[in-house]
Amino acid sequence: MDDSSFKAMAAEIDGLLGIDEARCSGLRTDSVAVRGYRGVDKDTGSISFPIYQSATFAHPAFGQSTGYCYSRCGNPTRLELENTIAALEGGKKAMAFSSGMAAISCLIKLMKSGDHAVVSDDLYGGTYRLFSQVFSQYGLEFTYADLTDEAALEAAFRPNTRLVFLETPTNPMMKVADIAAVADAAHVHGALLAVDNTFLTMYFQRPFDFGADIVVYSGTKYLCGHNDVLSGFLVVRDEELIEPLFNAAMSEGNQLAPFDSWLMIRSLKTLGVRLRQQEKNALRIAEFLKSNPHVTEVHYVGSPDHPNYQRSLRQTTGFGAMISFKTDTKQRAVDALERTKLVLFAESLGGAESLMTYPLVQTHGSIPAEMRDALGIDERLLRLSVGIEDVEDLLADLEQALA
Ligand SMILES: *Cc1c(COP(=O)(O)O)cnc(C)c1O
């Protein structure tokens, strides 16, 4: 890989400079998800996109290429997944990584030593650890602020702010930021807005419509939906960001493998049916939890009494299926984790299987105690990712676990 200039490579790899929007135009989200970007394989009629399990690609002749040379730069299965994600999101180009953290690590390569980023304070613990323990060692600065509060957001900017990293709804407290307001503020200060859209996905929330520049995913969650693949994505709205991010990704080599890319292509086909069922179940479960005498607080964006319910209605087409709630005592929270039978006590979220976690020590263990206290992440807080099981069985399981 000596002649690795982006332009030379882009000329060879179809779709590297961005997707051809016309290919999926007129199709709605569920149809794009099922068909994929290229659709049925023209040569064989294979409905399942082929797995190109190859690290390298032969040159037909000196100075010629099939469009592919080496899988770190481009792999046909990964490219089909990336292009499908870009088409679903309404972005110009998507890049698939081996995990959500790998995608976020690549995103940070847009920053240079001395640059500053404004970050949601209530965010995934692993992202906090990556910024505060790893990237802070390389001359990058991060300010954590409540991005659902416009005054707090405004106060967090500095002259060297290059990026705003927003998670909405937040994890685990389910606060909702006004994406358009955050995008406007970022742009006024000369910064880019990246939105971690893991909780709602493009199925329910489309950050590009509100001015975001980059959408970030842990694909491990709803996009995968089966708790069996780690993956991550960056999607860019405009062509200018393709080259710096592609160069970073291609140089570092954290891309998603062909087989995992194929599993993700398969997963996306059911994104809509899974999310609709998960949300339907979550609405019932949130109501049940609110009426349970041992539950003192319920945070679900889809409850009309959620403080940001109206804001959600304005910028999303659904509420997702993440619920956090507090029990009356620590012991009851611990007992509930041990007593559920259908709901599993496990980290992660978004899959067909309902999972419950204890954010204080699991997902948010790396967040400092003062920050956790200020956010309300305490020993009585549980986070539930609602799956697609029969809701009556889920309700019965939670009822006995909380009794
Ligand atoms: C899980 C998660 C991540 C990290 O993704 P991995 O795939 O686990 O590396 C980032 N952001 C959010 C919101 C997450 O839930």
Image: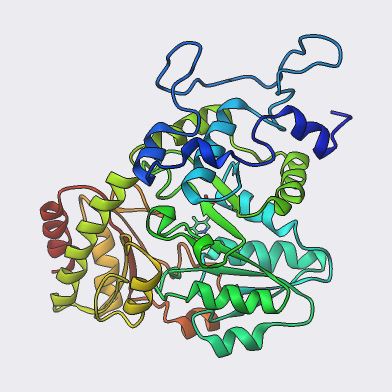
Q: In which quadrant will I find the C terminus?
A: bottom left
Q: Is residue 355 left or right of residue 293?
A: right
In this rendering, the answer to whether 389 lies above or below 41 is: below
Name the image quarter holding residue 94: top right
Q: Position of residue 311 (x, y in %)?
A: 38, 77
Viewer can see residue 398:
yes
Q: Position of residue 322 (x, y in %)?
A: 33, 63
Q: Is residue 242 left or right of residue 52?
A: right
Name the image quarter holding residue 263: top left
Q: Position of residue 301 (x, y in %)?
A: 32, 71
Give the colour scheme shown: rainbow
In this rendering, the answer to whether 268 lies above or below 292 is: above
In this rendering, the answer to whether 217 lies above or below 113 is: above
Residue, x 40% and y 49% (percent of image)? 222
Residue, x 46% and y 36% (percent of image)? 264
Q: Is residue 77 left or right of residue 387?
A: right
Q: Position of residue 5 (x, y in %)?
A: 85, 37
